[in-house]
Amino acid sequence: MFRITKRDKSSISDSLIFRSFGFAVGIILSMLLILLLGYNPIASIAALFDGAFGSLGGLRNTIKFAIPLATTALGLSIAFRMKFWNIGGEGQLLMGGTAAMFVSLIAGPNIPGWILIPSMLIAGIIGGAFWALIPGIFRIQLRTNETLFTLMMNYVALYLVKYLYHDLWRDRDPAKFNFPGIKMIQQQAVLPNVFGISVGIIVPLILAFLVYILIKRTKPGYEIRVVGESEPTANYAGMNVKRIMLGGVLLSGGIIGLAGAVKLAGETMTLTDNLTGGAGFTAIVIAWLANLSAPFILVVSFLVAGLEQGAQTMQLRLGVPAAVADIVKGLILMSFLGSEFFLRYRLVMTSVIGKNKRLHSQMKNHCDDPNVSDVSATRSAESDLTDDCAVRDEKAEVR
Amino acid sequence: MLSILTQPQFIASAISFSVILLLGTLGELLTERAGHLNLGVEGMMLLGGAIGYYAAVTTESLPLALIAACLGSGMGAFMYGFLTVTLRVNQNVTGLALTMFGMGLANAVGSKVAGTSTPVSIQAYFEYQPFHIKNPANELIAYIDRAFLSHDLYVYLTILLAIVMTIFLFRSREGLALRLTGENAAAADASGIKVTRIKYMYIVIGGMLCGLGGLYLPLVQQGSWTDTITAGQGWLVVALVIFVRWHPIKAIFGSFVFGALSILGYSVQLNTTLAKMPIFNQFIMSMFPYILTIIVLVITSARKKAWGGPAEIGHAYFREDR
Amino acid sequence: MTRSNEQTETLAFSMRGISKTFGSVCANEMIDFDVRQGEIHALLGENGSGKSTLMNILSGIYRADCGTIEVFGKQRVFHFPGDAIRCGIGMVYQHFKLADSLTATENIMAGLSEAQVRRAIKSGNDVNEHDVISSLTDRDDSSIRRRRDRNNRMSDLIRGYSERFHIDFDPDKPASQLSVSEKQSVEIIKVLIRGARILVLDEPTAVLTPQETKRLFGVLRKMRDDGCSIVFISHKLGEIMELCDRVTVLRKGRSVDTLVVSEVDTYDLVEKMVGFKIDLQIERPEPDPERLECLRVEGLSYRDEKGVTKLSDLSFSTCYGEILGVAGLAGGGQKELCEVIAGIIRPTSGDILVDGEIITGLSPRKISAKGVSMCFVPEDRLGMGLVASMGMVENILLKEYSFQKGIFVHSEKAREKSSQIIEELDIVTPSVTHPVRLLSGGNIQKVILGREIHLKPKLMIAAYAVRGLDIQSSHTIYRLLNEQKEKKVSVLYIGEDLDVLLALCDRVMVLCQGVNMGIVDTKNTNKIEVGQMMSGTKLEVLKRGVDYVSNN
């Protein structure tokens, strides 16, 4: 039989081992499912990786996918640090894109790019921040559940964009044969490419650095961390919790809105209801897997983006439906998530009670170990438990 | 406007639309009563729909289709349960991953039967309308018949299920055990309730109900499979559970309201004067269920009942911490 | 041989060689623990000695790493609490396990099997046969009636049990509205209905007034007379001497000795418990005779968000160089009082003055700058005052960062200060950046105290500063507080343990539901008097009563 106990901490090598194990399990499960669906699992997975990282073109596309994912995850990480469960990435992305599109639409065709692009990006920030602000205010003033509020806001945004797309902003140019759709943004509003990669790539890179500094080194970052850990403590220290949370929410939404604007200006070049491609949801998982740490968010986003790009290659080469990518992504994410358990808990073999004398003696030795039973250094068991209760997995408290 | 709302066809199609929502809501309601918020409803509905429909097309047997739907979505729910109950992973994140996975698998399976319509032998089951009145005595009865009584057995069984579930939750000992688990897992554990078993059981049963809801879509309502057929109804379910305050009877009416709102947009398009007004645009109307849920959320929190649902939603339970 | 057999027959349960580790901490080590049928057996030990862990193993909450459990002569393995319940073991936890939104009845009934209900009714019938039978036969047969019958059957059952043990509460009230002692009653009924023959109570008196404690003891004695075995976990010697038959002493996870209570005195027990001779006397230096007023509170009232009155028209003052204690039941307004003074919440009405200057409505930072310092140790120890996952440095910064210039946080000074505090207060931590949640309870509390003392306050609020600490650590904290008092700091001490309050403080104010019941000088009062005030009798009423008695 196994018994589960908590770990005090886990080393980086443990973390690597369990994560790779989780990854492997995810891949194996995916291959099994691909086999069940009647495709060649080995060829599929090979195509997946080759497509994602095997060629320059693939790599470029991977980076293209990674830009919105990383930016959104960075934005989310700030909200998550405050235990503000912003599930509204989709909506904030869409609203960022919508605001940028709005600027492009009202701007004349001849406005120079150096004015247009920044104003679109700023509009994007405002759009995303506004969409996060609505649930934020209710959370702060009335303690309305923000998880569900932000989730609902996603769909309000989605249908708003659908309305714009099919109706209000519809391009009624007869050349389009009455297909729904919005005009493309101006030529000069498109973000230029460098080495085949949109310059949008600098956005997540710079942001990762800024977010890292903000959280680790600055006063607002320190306040955000304290608020997330314990609101009573923040109050006690005289922090203005409402103001801090408002700032954090605006920042979070603003960054995500920026991601939407960058994606619009750099990739899709018009507003569609599929602007996000699910990035708002995927980024939640990314932020979580990266443990809310900015540098890791970059890495994880790159890997997840690789899955999306690889899936397209898989479909092209082997005719495996692109939906299989979602399967692989879902399974790898889930087994990754599952591997977290082994970082926080430890499985211990238990003896069938009374039969295992060896364990008895082991126990005895363990307890007699002077390093362990040194009174002052040992935390008493009871206080240990109360402590655990207080910080009962910071992460587990999702509400 | 009113004339649209009172048309018997409108009411009838709202009811048939709301069955899907109701099944999903009942499923998610059970899950949440066990203390778990499963954001994977969309994924589970798709899984149930695709796998069930695949079985329906290949075997042409309704019972097998139902079983396949239950197995498909039950499997998804079980994965969610394993991660959140046993491995204690964050529930929101797991639910989102489940949606991704479910959507992928469903579309991959569904693509194999896309373009095939529901077998006639199965359609026959749904043509049977147990309460249909063949020769209505007068206008009123004819109206009632067309609006409320001309539905297949699936619809009435679902409503019956909601009633049974209410009795189960609030009158039975098992239901009390379930509620206590969602309110305070540690207390339930100390009272001798098998917390892990209860959580697994209701997460999986909840998933199965979502799957059965998902199956109704391709099997009856649309008659064929299209990619991501649920089109966000899973998220509507998450909203509905809050809207009905975790109560199965209210879920009957709640899903009717949401169902009506969802199709109202399309019905209004037939009326040319109304269709010109932006507020009656089908997309704007589609927002209403979500906005309504937001309003409910805000009102309950303004009344200082910040939550009102099972107290421990979102918390992982580990017996060895206090 | 025959003798040992006889002994096993009369044993209620016997735990052998129980060990349990949490991470690197050994909570129980090869403990043997036997309890006979029909005895009240005390489990004595300091905080952290492993009492709760041992009993949580008995009740199936924890799995032991090794060891065996025999209940009524049969070896048992408990996989989860339900197994222990089925063997007749019932535990009343220190932190009650009740769902707030469910009624008392629902909390009791949840998880009961039909068989348990039938057995409970049967054993209820033996006692109260006539009533139950008549109530069953009086009803007619319609189906609605029958359903109501079933609900009534539960209510009758619970009522029967409460009457039998003279326990009183309203079974239809939601648990959130029950008082602490009512919640405890619910917990007791809960385990009794499950047919418990072995009852374990974890620190049951910690939250009760002396009067309520007395009533509880009555209930426990009654159960013993009915043949139940009771394990009474406590670290209060007086209660053990009063109530228990035998006592087992635990120290640092090991079982030290089992003694017959009538054959020992408290000094022996203390020595067994602590491991060496120790003076339990708490020092009380003379307060500053000048009696300069530091804090003055006038007509303070506070209503919380839900509109519940937490403090009502509270007036008192503290002096430099004295410790004013605040006593009261849990939730009697102590927490709100601290928070109002520290500026965390705003009072509905009334004024707070420090040195004659009004500080009501100022921000916590400004109040702190005026020399008011608070260390509040909440039930979970880390909830207020410390950030669990941060190290000492960042926790020290909590009070300083806002006074630094620029946007960046500078931690050099805080680092020095941390080392200084570590040295002064003997804090054991691997490094100044080691997360404080991984420290032991005593060290955590020293970190808060150290930080606050370093701010050189005029008024120091110490709330529950010794919560969960062992005797030695507690005495270190008392010493620190006394040092502050001698430095002419005015100390407001909020505590749970009446004995400590009476020994440490110069004066004690008693709060009951936010109302000041009176302030007594600890030199001429006693526990009974304070206990009566805690349960809502005003001091002047008490005094009048005394006058009345003495006049007649």
Image: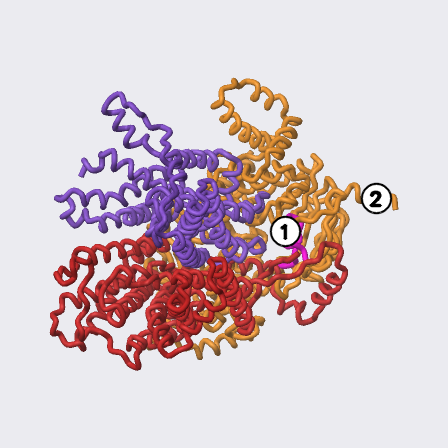
Chain colours: A red, B purple, C orange
Residue B64 rendering spot, x and y as whole percentages: 48, 43
Residue drawn at (57%, 58%), measured in percent from left and top? A385
The image's mark for residue A151 is none
Can I make out residue B31 in this image?
A: no
Q: Quadrant of residue B20?
A: top left
Can I make out residue A41 in this image?
A: yes
Name the amino acid, label 2.
Asn
Residue A260 rendering spot, x and y as whole percentages: 28, 66
Q: Secondary structure at mark 2?
A: helix
* Quadrant including the C terminus of chain B: bottom right
* Quadrant including the N terminus of chain B: top left
Name the amino acid, label 1.
Asn
Write the start and end of the magenta stretch as one range: C48-65
Residue B292 rendering spot, x and y as whole percentages: 28, 46
Q: Earlier in the sequence, mark 2 or mark 1?
A: 2
Determine if marks 2 and 1 fall on one subunit: yes
